[in-house]
Amino acid sequence: MSNATPQGQGTQNGRHPTGPRCAAIVGPYLSGKTTLMESLLLATGAIQRRGTAKDGSTVGDASPESRARKMSVQVTPASTTYLGESWTFLDCPGSIEFGQETMNALMVADAAIVVVEPVVDRAMTVAPLLHFLDAHSIPHLIFVNKMDTTDVRARDVMEALQSISERPLVLRQVPIRKGQVIDGYVDVVSERAYRYKPGQASDLIPLPADMQPREKEVRQGLLEKLADYDDKLLEQLLEDVVPPKEEIYRQLAADLAHDLIVPVFLGAAERDHGVRRLLKALRHEVPEIAETNARLGVRPGDGPMLRVFKTLHQPHAGKLSFARVLRGKVKDNATLGADRIGGIYRMLGETQTKLPEAAAGEVVALGRMEHARTGRALTPDGDAGEAGGKFAPVLTPVYSLAITAEKRADEVKLSGSLAKLVEEDPSLHVEMQPDTHEHLLMGQGDIHLQVAVERLKSKYNLPVATARPQVPYKETIKSGIKQHTRYKRQTGGHGQFADIHVEIKPQPRGGGFAFTESIVGGSVPRNFIPSVEIGVADYLKRGPLGFPVVDVTVDLQDGQYHDVDSSDMAFRTCAGMAMREAMPKCNPVLLEPVFHVEIVVPNAHTARVQRLITGRRGQVLGFDAKEGWSGWDVVAALMPQAELHDLIVELRSLTLGVGTFTCRFDHLQELTGRLADQVVQARNAVAAAQ
Ligand SMILES: Nc1nc2c(ncn2[C@@H]2O[C@H](COP(=O)(O)OP(=O)(O)OP(=O)(O)O)[C@@H](O)[C@H]2O)c(=O)[nH]1
Ligand SMILES: [Mg+2]
């Protein structure tokens, strides 16, 4: 068969990889990732007692923000040793709002453990993650957790998951049920049966006779899928030869390493069910750093190279940069990037152990790397650039809040602290809106921003207030006018004098502002004309409705001056007076920004999304299948910016959390009637209060 794959480097001669390895624990919100990491750490002896998600005592959720919410809001590395081999697990947040953390962690892992719940209706929630894994060919296996609370059949879960996975899934275990509860499992490769024992390795038991038909069926399915990628195995199957176990394990490892198949394991992390079986599979089948580097396009070389995948500013202990050593070896105090390393630490949640050095494959935290940035690959010579291979894209914001420091004196400090937050989390953006002068904090959702705001307070002692951002409305005029204005003032010494005739005209949408002059005979001397323009432009910053004016032309046509009393200032003031008098007579009208929006959802939700768009004053432009995402649509629409603020919230609640959108400014559109009146009234109220 042409798609047969070469053996993974580390699996040659039947030997499994033994260098330090890293597995990211990912999956939908609350599927049990942090609980599973706790079990893995307990089973490998890194911790002696397990903490629980309920009382926030787990290694994974030690941060105050996680504890307060009983959910993971950041990636937590924990290193351990299993049968003499070094492992780092990265407990990733499941919430889509912290997806950047998860993607960054996945880009340094050798494999991902996708933890899912055995709920057929919610299989869709894992689809975006599986797409990401397949798009980057990241080896991944699925751990179906919480099997202790369900009577759903493993085959139904498999079917639901297969319907959203591009890669074939292979079930590795068949559950043994005793009444309603799952009591143990049959491993379909070794064909051995085990009974779970809480907190200990399972007991080997004789394979129950009534399990044999199902076990044979699942095993046959597994072998057939493996044979798709291996000619020898295919021949053996066709000739009814039983392939040797080692041969199957070797093929499983090679296919996992190339993201050709997705093995599926069953268990219940909270009871340690299936955790040792999972560890064994990881040990034998997960590739090591050399293969991961090849997949990521990390260029080989002699010196050390590290990829920073997370940055943490600690209020007292300083900055920590979490990194994976991609190649070579780094020593404490050595130069890396633009800094000297100030401490190398092995992490177990919040516990740090100082190390003299770290070797390829290890995940460590580096102290005081002031210039290091999340996402960069570093060498002793500086930034590795393209030689560092691929990393995760930065998510674009879908939700924003306007923020102000509660204490005025903190305004300056705010910019610096926000910069640190953005450094920790590239999916946070900060922007100054030029029209509304608001500081916008932009990110992936309300909880994402709430956590950022909490960190401003807890880490930087900077309480801030948040508000829904103002929409940067503009205004224009619908008719033109000719205006004559004279400015004359006699005070004490010499007075002030300017006299101008201007013609104001509307421009087509998008025409902007243009100032022209058609002065003949020097009625307004050349040197004063720029001052007239400045006076006009100043006025246009806030038109008759209270918003910046666009799409107008102002032509200076005639005027008068006085040899002594005319000045730049006088012409500038006169121009402002002319505009103030004329503009309200030009039929001013409000303009609202309209965005081009693309909403991505599973196609079962497309019709509802179209209703959502029209319900928010939008216009559906059409929809299409999303390329490379079977079963997903992209709905294109034009929507007013005023309706986009909480679009993500409604979209997620419509689509089990998986719907998302991107948008860009498209055009300004007239807004009239009751909505326009409300906008103008609100603007006037704010202006009156200022
Ligand atoms: N019945 C049962 N409950 C479990 C199991 N594993 C985890 N849970 C419960 O599921 C809930 C979520 O567990 P977590 O480990 O915090 O889940 P998580 O995937 O880390 O959550 P996020 O990181 O916030 O996405 C907690 O209430 C756990 O007690 C299990 O095997 N069986
Ligand atoms: Mg968690």
Image: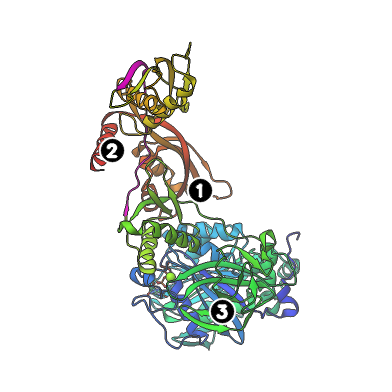
Q: Is residue 212 magenta?
A: no
- Most extreme residue toward the top is 521
Residue located beneath label 2 in the image: 683
Amino acid bearing label 2: Arg
Residue located beneath label 3 in the image: 343
**Dot 3: within a 10 Å radius of its alpha carbon, few (fewer than 14), some, or many (20 or more) residues?**
many
Amino acid bearing label 1: Trp
Question: How much space separates mark 1 and mark 3, taking CA atoms?
Answer: 47 Å
Q: Secondary structure at mark 1?
A: strand
Instruction: Point out the stretch of residues depicted in magenta.
Output: 466-489
Residue under the point 53% across and 67% down:
310
Where ligand 1 lies, by quadrant?
bottom left
Which part of the image, by quadrant, shows the N terminus?
Answer: bottom right
Q: Nearer the viewer, residue 594 or 352?
A: 352
Asked if residue 184 shows in the view, the reply is no
Asked if residue 247 shows in the view, the reply is yes
Q: Is residue 487 magenta?
A: yes
Residue located beneath label 1 in the image: 632
Horizontal side of 570 relative to 237 (left or right) equals left
Provide residue 19's location: percent of width, then percent of height.
66, 79
The mark that comes first in sequence, 1 or 3, is 3
Q: Nearer the viewer, residue 336 or 299?
A: 336
Are the residues at dot 3 and dot 2 in contact (C-beta closer than 8 Å)?
A: no
Q: Quadrant of residue 549?
A: top left
